[in-house]
Amino acid sequence: MSKHLNLTLHVWRQKNAKCDGKFVEYPAENISPDMSFLEMLDIVNEGLIRKGEEPITFDHDCREGICGTCSMVINGRPHGPRERTTTCQLHMRSFKDGDSVTIEPWRAEAFPVIKDLMVDRGAFDRIIAAGGFISVPTGSPQDANALPIPKEKAELSMDAAACIGCGACVAACPNASAMLFLSAKVTHLGLLPQGQPERYIRVRDMVAQMDAEQFGTCTNHGECEAACPKGIKMENIARMNRDFIKASLTYRPASTSGGGAG
Amino acid sequence: MELNARIPDGPIDKKWEKHRFDLKLVNPANKRKYKVLVVGSGLAGGAAAASLAELGYEVECYCYQDSPRRAHSIAAQGGINAAKNYQNDGDSIYRLFYDTVKGGDFRAREANVHRLAEVSNNIIDQCVGQGVPFAREYGGLLDNRSFGGAQVSRTFYARGQTGQQLLIGAYQALERQIGLGKVKMFPRHEMLEVIVVDGVAKGIVTRDMVTGEVESHVADAVCLATGGYGNVFYLSTNAKGCNGTAIWRAYKKGAAFANPCFTQIHPTCIPVTGDHQSKLTLMSESLRNDGRIWVPKRKEDCGKPAAEIPEEDRDYYLERKYPSYGNLAPRDVSSRAAKQVCDEGRGVGPTRLGVYLDFSDAIKRLGAAKIEEKYGNLFEMYERITDENPYKTPMRIFPASHYTMGGLWVDYNLMSTIPGLFVLGEANFSDHGANRLGASALMQGLADGYFVIPYTIGGYLAGIKPGTRIKADDPAVKAAEQSVSDRMSQLMSIGGKETPDHFHRELGKVMWEMCGMGRNEAGLKKALELIPKIREEFWTNLRIPGSGNDLNQSLETAGRVADFLEIGELMCLDALERRESCGGHFREEWQTAEGEALRDDENFAHVAAWEYKGEGQAPVRHVEQLTFDNVHLATRSYK
């Protein structure tokens, strides 16, 4: 049995979006290295509840690295020190006895703090609603094998589709840019034949929404790729920029001369 | 209470077609005059909300997560079944139907299962159309793999992230409708009550989890797609937020709860490491395509590293006991077999509650690169959690609570015993009987959401005059709202000492021990004594800091735990009354000489649907007799 750890946490506490926040120090004692980071916080929280203090609010759900809910900056890095890992999959064996651990929410204009470590990532949903889809009403597609897709393309599309929408890319970026997130969706759908009819309108509409949400632009720092728990690559941003330029140059306002037969 | 399943007449393969024609239609121009509330945004809820909005209904969708994309369907790994027969290996709609009825140990409704198999093919078409990047062969066509309980390759998959990709497909369809203004989305909202007027569902009461505000929403119909109640065991593969509150509130308002004891304990999860454990992580059943399950033949070898145990001293017990299905025996059978070898003292790992899932043969046969391509993300996840490299040492796995086949009783139209209240996906009971086969949950969620509810809800709404919705200030609405506020205040005012999780863990221990993989009369009776005691302590010794009129995660958890403390009791009662073994429900008194489940078809070939009779009153057990006209009742054999 490996030795248990004692840590000092510096946790961002903020009552709501309107109040100022501050760091509060908490001890985390007798922590097993087999615990996940969130299980360590659970223990701290249970201690706070028993003392009648408000526990630390943080977002979490699946605790297996796939839902994208957990979101905290640990010692300055989104999702903590381990590469390609969400906070829920980060285990305490990544820390040493006596360590000080600073825990903050995602920090970005477009992700306002709701409480403590919890932020509002609704902007991501609105970007998808603006164009991150293929318009295919239920019941309309043809047989699934009617459209062969080269394996390499399907794999590349899947690599991009692995994005969990956690927002670590935005939190890591000095510009709080959402371009890794957008480009993952643009790539996922844009590489597939089904995604071609809306390929250019999609990128244009998504970028317009991104701008409206106050995300910054990409200046090629590469922090997003380093922080991404799912290994989404920056080359997607290049692909998106290419599509965006083409979309902008070929843009024509939709015809307004409606009316139909009959 | 009358349980009329409303199964259409005619031969099994014509029922759905006939029913679709018989269902009344809502005129396209009238659809926008009807409002439908969809609670839950997973595969069933997300698909339903998007599809109903596409048809023209006014839709509101609610989820407790911060985004509909995070519903727990996302964590499904292995795949989704369909009867495409692309592999030319003998599959058909009838075979998928047959395997599912048999896999469920003859406790599912034939007509529903056949419909599920029929629409399975449409689901794959729909998902590919949406851009779901399923695995493909070099020729560009779709790849398949095998899953437990089947001898054909009918499972479509997207690496080990099939649920994620299918959910993103449904989520994008839903977001498209949100962008078009056809769906109004309410994230971070928890449903806490159903509004029932004259016995008919007319809306819901929710709590805004950010502001604490209790709000009511009226509509013409309500769809619950809120998932299962597997978290009743505290430790499960479910997300931390998964809960049974929505269906439990509906039960208390008159919706029958069917087969609550039918729970699935999944054989391949990462074992518990200590008391701090907050959840358990599944390792996809698809791993059993290439991994071989074994334990040492002798107890004395259990402490040795796996590599030091020679081939002849290993017991590949699934291959030995079930030679034709081997490592792909169904989940209930595999879980029980794992429990047996651990009970014999032959388990491995620090707690001795584990068995090996070994890939060394597959790596020798196919190469590590091929294994990585197939299961890379699962291996990575395993390594993250356990700090062990499964390419080098075998995985250790153990069964854990995963899925609940039981749920609210629904008729063929997916309507509960409360008219106007529909139940979709894992939240209902209908398709999986006493054991769900792998890769069938995704199929059922999407079938209900994309291809069943859009038809059947029309048949219901066509009978309602448009514009006759109740008003938001109706006394019934205000009363429902008040009951929710009162309950919140009650929870906040207990002023005890213990945390909500404390009571949840206590309940979980009782449920796992007495209503888990093996159940018996004495244990269940004991559980029925212990649970009310935990509940009593909960209501006198719970502590929730902060305020009810604010974001308060302890209050959210407490409300869910309060309901689990009641659900667990009903599960035990149902398990006690079902005096037979079937599927995941294994009553130790009813087993064959070889330790297999022994069904009692004469007395228990039925659905048990429980009716709530009020606080402190015993619930009443109703019965829907099941008839098997097509798949003849037989003892399941996977030997």
Image: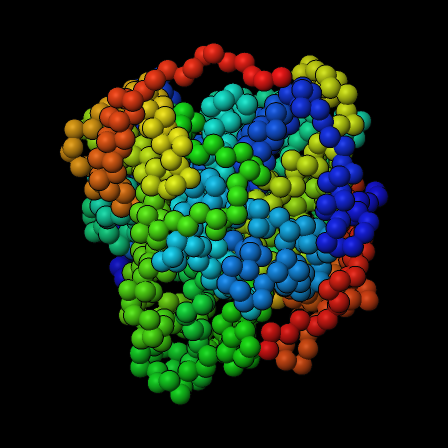
**In-image side of A31 versus B595 (left or right):** left
| Left or right of residue A243: residue A195 | right
Quick check: can you spot residue B367? yes
Q: Give me the residue at 44% from left, 84% from top.
A: B298
- Image quarter (top left, top right, bottom left or bottom right) of the C terminus of chain A: top right
User: In the rendering, at what x and y percent does residue B632 appear?
Assistant: 75, 67
Q: Is residue B534 above or below residue A118?
A: below
Please tell me which residue is depicted at 34% across the width and 17% down the height of the picture.
A252
Count of numbered circles on the image: 0
Q: Nearer the viewer, residue B79 or B246?
A: B79
Q: Which residue in the rendered view is the most extreme toward the top?
A: A257
Percent x, y for residue A13? 32, 28
> Percent position (x, y) of residue B306?
34, 77
Residue A127 image offset from top left, x and y in percent: 38, 27
Q: Looking at the rendering, which quadrant does residue A210 occupy?
A: top left
Determine the residue positioned at 23% across, 31% down. Answer: A242
Residue A41 in the image: above or below residue B545:
below
Can you name the residue that lies furthest to the bottom here?
B312
Quadrant of residue A219 within the rendered picture: top left
Residue at the (59%, 36%) spot, across then down: B48
